[in-house]
Image (spheres, rainbow, N blue to C red):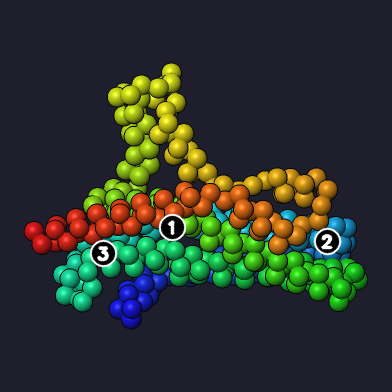
Amino acid sequence: MKAFLALVHREYIEHRGAFFIAPLVMVALVFLLTILAFSVERINTRFSGQMLTVMPTWVFEAGFAALAAGWLIYLGFVLFFYCADGFAADKRNNAMLFWKSMPASDFKVLLSKLAAALTILPGSVFAVALLSILLMFGVAYVTTMIAGLGSATLLWNILGIFAQMSLVLLVVVVCALLWYLPYMALVGAMGTVAGRWAIPLALLLPSVLSVLEWVLLGGGMHPFATRTWAFLDYRSQFPVSFDYLDRIWEGQEMFDATRFMVDFLQKFDWLQVGIGAVFALVAIYIASEYRRRSAAN
């Protein structure tokens, strides 16, 4: 277990630039630019503070959701490139023989990379995301104080919103990682075989499979009207239930984190998550066998 944790920690050390340092630098730059904009009166502080108290709960919830969505897009982007590039890093930097000398199988090494993609790497982005949102909430509250509208009640409500939305974001991130696990494993396995060519291959593979089914088995009027394409389209879209959220945006209900998470988890396709996990393990095992045999030759 210690060897496996050391392998996961190695992945963090080698890729912390994309998953921790770069996001942290972006947060620092945006925060400094925000302070500068207020200090040179590019933004009217009093007017902004008054606007924040018109619908304070909705404003802070919407602001959290918007920033969280941006960080989720960033996380998906860097995870895709990590799986395409990180699984082939040992072969590219001539470290294969060194890792071959360690008491760790190829399957364990590749599994540690997948484990890092599910835990410590997205965890770094999650932590920076919460820091950025907390800073945004702090700036917003300071503007309300400057406008003379700040209060202990408002501060307590803001902290409550931050705690609830942070828990919601954690649940969404965990479910998203589980949902897209087979994609990460497939891209990683392709990276083990094809190196950086896994990136265009991963983008091309769905089209090839759909066209192949259309040619061999027939189907709709065009190659993208097949069961393969419909399934891949379903697995590519995060299964979020918008029923409860629609009622929130229409003003019919106040947002409640517990109700949202219960509704979200009940409608989540857990059967597909289980099938995807099995597929991921099989893909990683096949890639490890290829890695073992290719290194031996």
- Residue at position x 33%, y 24% from top? 217
The percent position of residue 173, horizontal first and vertical second, equals 55, 60
Q: Which residue is mark 3?
A: 107
- First-in-chain label (2 vs 1): 2
Judge left or right: residue 14 versus residue 21. Answer: left
- Residue at position x 58%, y 58% from top? 172
* Res 102 quadrant in image: bottom left
Q: Which amino acid type is shown beneath numbered disc 3? A: Phe
Would you say residue 242 is visible in this rendering? yes
- Would you place residue 268 above or below residue 114 in this image? above
Q: Which residue is mark 1?
A: 79
Q: Which residue is mark 2?
A: 56
Tell me, yes or no, whether the two marked residues, 1 and 3, touch with CB atoms within 8 Å.
no
- Quadrant where the C terminus sits is bottom left
- Determine crowd level at label 1: few under 14, some 14-19, many 20+ residues with C-alpha closer than 10 A: many
- First-in-chain label (1 vs 3): 1
Q: CA separation, marks 3 and 2?
A: 51 Å
